[in-house]
Image (cartoon, helix red, strand yellow):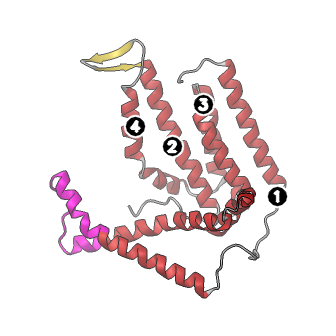
Amino acid sequence: MRDIAFGQFYPTHSLLHRLDPRAKVILLISFIVLVFCTANYVSLALVALSVFAIVLLSKVPLRLYFKSLKMIVVIVLITSALNLFYGTGEPLLEWGFIKITVCGINNAVFVAVRIICLILISSALTFTTSPTDLTDALERLMKPLNVFHIKVHEIAMMMTIALRFVPLLLEETDKIMSAQKARGADMESGSLVQRIKALIPVLIPLFVSAFRRAYELAVAMECRCYQGGQGRTRMKTLHLSKRDYFSVLFVILVIVGVVLCNVFLPPVVR
C-alpha cells in the first residue's frame, strides 16, 4: 500500500508541467474517450503509443507509474480473465461449458490495455499538475455551468481535495495496519471472514483519522477567511500558449488517426 503513488504531484521541469492545466484536463478527457473508441489493434496501438509518449514527456520516473499500476493489477487480471471466456465464434479451446475463442482473446487484450492506458494518462495528469492548478482548471472549464446557478468553484475544490486525500488516507491506512500488527494483530492468515473481521480495528481508526483531517482542513480554511469562489482573486492567471495549442493539435491528430483506422480497417471488437 505504501507503494501506491496515484494522486501525488511530482515537481520537475518538463513540457507537460509547463502546459496549461486546462489543456491537460481536455487531453485527459479526450484520451479517455479515445481509448474506448478503438475497434482494432492498429487504433489501439496508436492510442497506447500516444499515452506512452505523454508518459515520457512528463519526465516523471517510470517507477512511479508502475507503482500506480500496482493497485489495479488484480483488477486487470480478473477483468481480462472474465472477458477471455466471454466471446462468440469458433472455440479454440473447449472444456465443458468453458470455451476460449478468438473474440474472447481480443476482448481480454483490449480490456487490459484500455485499463492500463486510463491509469497511466490519469497518473500523468496528477503527477504534472499541482492541486491548486487543477482546481483552477476545473473551475474554468465548468464556468459555463454558472448560468444554471451551479457552484462551480465549490465543486472543483471538493474534487481536488478528494483527489489529494487519496495518498494521505492510503499512507494513514498503512501506518494503522503496521501499528496493529505490532500489537499482535494477524491480518494475513485465516479464512476470508476472519480476514475481514481483522480489518475492523483498522477501519475504525481510519474513519476517525479521516474525519479529524477533514475538520482540521475546514478550520484552516475558515481561519483564512475562505468563503467560496465569489469575489475571490487568483494568485496565478491561466494563459494559453503555443505549446498548449500544439498539444490540442496533437490530440486532434490522434483522434483523426483513430477514426481513419476504425473506418478503413476491419473491427476486432464491437
Query: Where is mark 1, residue-wise?
Result: 240
Secondary structure mostly seen in magenta is helix
Q: Nearer the viewer, mark 2 or mark 3?
A: 3
Is there a contact, CB below 8 Å, between mark 1 and mark 3? no
Q: Nearer the viewer, residue 190 or 218?
A: 218
Which residue in the rendered view is the most extreme toward the bottom?
223
Q: Which mark is residue 38?
A: 3
Question: Dot 2: few (<14), some (14–19), or many (≥20) neighbours within 10 Å?
Answer: some
Query: Where is mark 4, residue-wise?
Result: 79
- Please name the residue shown 39% across and 25% down the image: 86
Q: Amino acid at mark 2?
A: Ile
- Precedes in sequence: disc 1 or disc 2: 2
Q: Amino acid at mark 3?
A: Thr
Q: Amino acid at mark 1?
A: Leu
Query: Where is mark 2, residue-wise?
Result: 116
Disc 1 from disc 3: Cα separation: 30 Å
Q: Secondary structure at mark 3?
A: loop
Question: Dot 4: few (<14), some (14–19), or many (≥20) neighbours within 10 Å?
Answer: some
Q: Position of residue 28 (x, y in %)?
A: 64, 49
Question: Dot 3: few (<14), some (14–19), or many (≥20) neighbours within 10 Å?
Answer: many
